[in-house]
Amino acid sequence: SRLVRQLLSLARNGPGALDSVALQPLGLNEPALEVSMDWVPQAIKRSIDLGFEGAEHPLMIGADPDRLRELINNLIDNAIRYSQEGGRVTVRTGQIGQDQCRLAISDDSRSIPVAERARIFERFHRLLGTQEDGSGLGLAIVSEIATLHGARITLEDDRDGTGNTFTVHFPSSETALGA
């Protein structure tokens, strides 16, 4: 059923979906915190320290609320799924300059090789040697949703040298909505 939901999500968020997306001003902190809280039971089952570091002030972006939640869900799902048991996952929001907001998810998973980083956003792509269940669609969905929001995704090694940090750079609501 998860695979069917992901395939439907890809169809709903694919290149032709831009016409059906109505972005509205939305705070980034609230859905990031809410979705993070939804994942606490899964994190506890794997003894993962799931943390949230929200910006001190509201971060307004142009977003479709349901798609934004789906993007955050997929990133946190991957982070928890692929992190080592007893590891940590941290969700952060913040401002970058005047015209960008960021959502960053850091994990303790196996570091993704630089040569593979562009390919992980392709449909059905999975890293060799991955033991976890998955279809290789989660990051493709994230990429499609980010594109619909005029956002871009970066992937870097985590700050502490263990794991990865996925960062989605959203235009602020004034930039995204042309205000």
Image (spheres, rainbow, N blue to C red):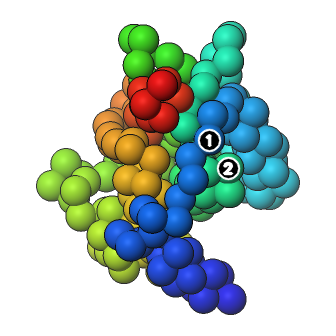
**Local crowd size for mark 2, using a 10 Å CA cut-off: few (<14), some (14–19), many (≥20):** some
Q: Which residue appears farthest toward the front when viewing the image? A: 179
Q: CA distance from mark 2 to mark 1?
A: 8 Å
- Residue 146 drawn at (x, y percent): 43, 51
Residue 102 drawn above or below residue 137: above
Q: Specify the amino acid type for callout 2.
A: Pro
Q: Specify the amino acid type for callout 1.
A: Gln
Q: In this figure, which residue is indicated by the disc labeled 2?
A: 65
Q: In this figure, which residue is indicated by the disc labeled 1?
A: 24
Residue at the spot x=39%, y=11% of the render? 97
- For marks 2 and 1, the one nearer the N-term is 1
Please state if 36 lies on the left or on the right of 75 as rendered. Answer: right
**Local crowd size for mark 1, using a 10 Å CA cut-off: few (<14), some (14–19), many (≥20):** some
Residue at the spot x=36%, y=79% of the render? 124
Of helix, strand and loop, which one carries label 2?
helix
Residue 92 drawn above or below residue 149: above
